[in-house]
């Protein structure tokens, strides 16, 4: 059986890429297709595979500014030639689920989320505060068209699997499709405690994009008097640096072993944005570290309030500062925090996703 794995883009080793890595391990002969591939940006396990990219790869500065070519993504994803493949597995948060497969082939979509910016987060990405009034006026019809295209192509997947109940609800709302839930894999063997004594500091590990609300983490840590380390990169970096005071440091993306060391040293890990699932909180918990997260979205399924951290209702910097200080002062025990994370391990994911593949192959 020929298998194709489709991912929107490969430009860094974030949550979606970790899912791709785990599924590629299950299907070692599968070919990988993606809109843009920045070589060297993902794990050796992915880099060693045959990766085919779209024509967007050859456009000016695409490796750095690929998001600027968003209106071309529908054309690019539809041009992949998948006629020789019997099974297509898309890992989609943008356009990947809209690939066109051969008649008789089966398509399982592991949906990270329906397109955020086209559906319910337009303002955070393209509102007047971000792009100016002219920019907003230009982007609004483009995103409306993308939303219609996104909905109209939902039928190309034979079966949807969501990364959380929160995403399953969004799939039902925007695609009118039912989705089972299989939580993404967490490498609990790699992310583990080592006896490091955490300091009274906070950590963010995140792409620096608007919906992540890193600005809230910065303001809350300033008010709490807690130093903050931010690991990640993205278009928000210049603005965030302007907001940050002397207690905030930026490291850019760092290697996985360095991220693990950062978790182990952190007193608390922050998740201020609404996540569809959120792999970072579970990596941190696997290392025995508590998480302070927004009481919305995927965090409601991954953080146990008062046991593995704290859930904060709303976006008041004062409330966040109080939750950060309270979590640091509580010195929550590492063992129950890690025990909770073990429920999300890689072996569990492999078993559940294999069962979903069997179901889509058996369906007609």
Image (cartoon, helix red, strand yellow):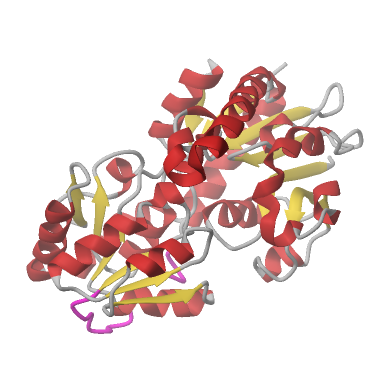
The magenta span reads 188-201
Write the residue at 39% across / 33% down. Answer: 166
Q: Position of residue 126 (x, y in %)?
A: 51, 39
Q: Judge left or right: residue 234 versus residue 224.
A: right
Front residue of 115/249: it is: 249
Can the viewer see residue 193 in this picture? no
Q: Position of residue 24 (x, y in %)?
A: 69, 53
Can the viewer see residue 292 in this picture? yes
Q: Position of residue 241 (x, y in %)?
A: 40, 69
The question of residue 193 being in magenta is answered with yes
Front residue of 166/287: it is: 166
In which quarter of the view is residue 74 placed?
top right
Q: Position of residue 146 (x, y in %)?
A: 64, 27
Q: Chief secondary structure of the magenta span?
A: loop
In which quarter of the view is residue 110 placed?
top right
As drawn, which residue projects farthest toward the bottom?
196
Q: Judge left or right: residue 40 versus residue 294.
A: right
Q: Judge left or right: residue 11 versus residue 291.
A: right
Write the residue at 58% across / 40% down. Answer: 93
Write the residue at 27% across / 68% down. Answer: 288
Indicate the quadrant containing the C terminus: top left, top right, bottom left or bottom right: top right
Q: Is residue 332 depicted above or below 181 in this figure?
A: below
In which quarter of the view is residue 240 placed?
bottom left
As drawn, which residue projects farthest toward the front?
134
Front residue of 234/191: it is: 234
The question of residue 58 being in magenta is answered with no
Indicate the quadrant containing the N terminus: top left, top right, bottom left or bottom right: top right
């Amino acid at each position: 059986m020929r298998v194709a794995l489709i991912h929107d883009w490969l430009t860094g080793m974030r949550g979606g890429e970790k899912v791709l890595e785990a599924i590629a391990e299950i299907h070692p002969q599968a070919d990988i297709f993606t809109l843009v591939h920045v070589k060297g940006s993902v794990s050796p396990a992915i880099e060693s595979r045959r990766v085919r990219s779209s024509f967007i790869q050859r456009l000016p500065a695409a490796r750095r500014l690929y998001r600027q070519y968003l209106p071309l993504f529908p054309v690019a994803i539809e041009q992949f030639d998948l006629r020789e493949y019997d099974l297509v597995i898309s890992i989609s948060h943008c356009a990947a689920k809209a690939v066109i497969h051969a008649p008789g082939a089966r398509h399982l979509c592991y949906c990270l989320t329906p397109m955020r910016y086209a559906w319910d987060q337009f303002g955070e990405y393209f509102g007047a505060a971000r792009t100016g009034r002219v920019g907003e006026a230009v982007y609004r019809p483009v995103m409306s068209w993308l939303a219609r295209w996104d909905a109209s192509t939902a039928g190309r997947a034979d079966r949807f699997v969501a990364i959380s109940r929160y995403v399953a609800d969004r799939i039902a709302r925007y695609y009118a499709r039912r989705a089972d839930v299989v939580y993404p894999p967490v490498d609990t063997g790699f992310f583990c405690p080592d006896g490091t004594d955490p300091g009274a500091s906070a950590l963010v590990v995140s792409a620096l994009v608007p919906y992540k609300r890193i600005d809230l983490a910065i303001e809350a840590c300033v008010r709490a008097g807690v130093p903050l380390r931010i690991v990640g990169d993205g278009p928000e970096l210049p603005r965030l640096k302007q907001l940050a005071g002397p207690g905030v440091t930026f490291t850019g993306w760092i290697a996985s072993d360095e991220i693990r060391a950062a978790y182990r040293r952190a007193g608390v890990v922050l998740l201020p944005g609404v996540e569809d699932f959120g792999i970072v909180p579970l990596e941190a918990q696997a290392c025995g570290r508590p998480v302070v997260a927004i009481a919305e979205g995927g965090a409601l399924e991954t953080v146990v309030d008062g046991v593995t951290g704290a859930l904060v209702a709303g976006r008041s910097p004062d409330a966040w500062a109080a939750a950060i200080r309270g979590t640091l002062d509580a010195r929550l025990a590492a063992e129950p925090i890690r025990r909770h994370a073990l429920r999300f391990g890689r072996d569990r994911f492999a078993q559940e996703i294999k069962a979903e593949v069997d179901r889509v192959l058996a369906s007609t």
